[in-house]
Amino acid sequence: MDELDTYFEARRILYLADPVQWWYAHKAEYPRLYRFAGDILSIPGSAVAVERVFSGGRDTISLRRASLKPETIRTLMLLKHHIRLRRKGLEDLLQTVQEL
């Protein structure tokens, strides 16, 4: 039986288990999957979209605008985002929505 098939046939892992510890404990049973899991689990979590929003917020909320109301800042950021989407073009926007 293939290593992957063996893994799928095994009993289920507790949802609360630490995946790094689990793979380390089972590395003898699944050596190739262990290396693969190590590669995947070592990728740092990042949300580029979130980082872009914070960056845009930093640009929008300058020292001059620090006294703006939260609603005004939100409106400015939404307008800025809307303008970027319009620049990108309707076709690109539709493709992005379809990929989601």
Image (cartoon, rainbow, N blue to C red):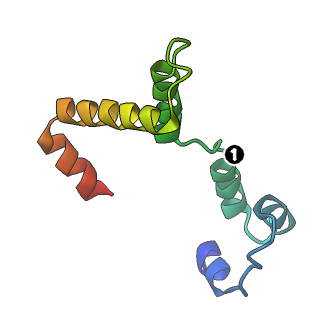
Residue 62 horizontal/vertical position (percent): 52, 15
| Snapshot quadrant of residue 82 | top left
Q: Is the residue 57 above or below the residue 14 in the image?
A: above
Q: What residue do we see at 62% from left, 81% from top?
A: 8
Residue under label 1, please give it: 42
Q: What residue do we see at 47% from left, 19% from top?
A: 59
The amino acid on which the numbered mark 1 sits, given as a three-letter code, is Ser
| In front of the other: 28 or 8 | 8
Residue 47 horizontal/vertical position (percent): 53, 42
- Residue furthest to the top in view is 64
Q: What residue do we see at 21% from left, 45% from top?
A: 93
| In front of the other: 99 or 61 | 61
Residue 90 horizontal/vertical position (percent): 13, 42
Q: In what quadrant of the picture does the N terminus appear?
A: bottom right
Q: Is the residue 67 above or below the residue 7 in the image?
A: above
Q: In the picture provided, is 64 more to the left or to the right than 7? A: left
Label 1 secondary element: loop
Q: What residue do we see at 19% from left, 29% from top?
A: 87
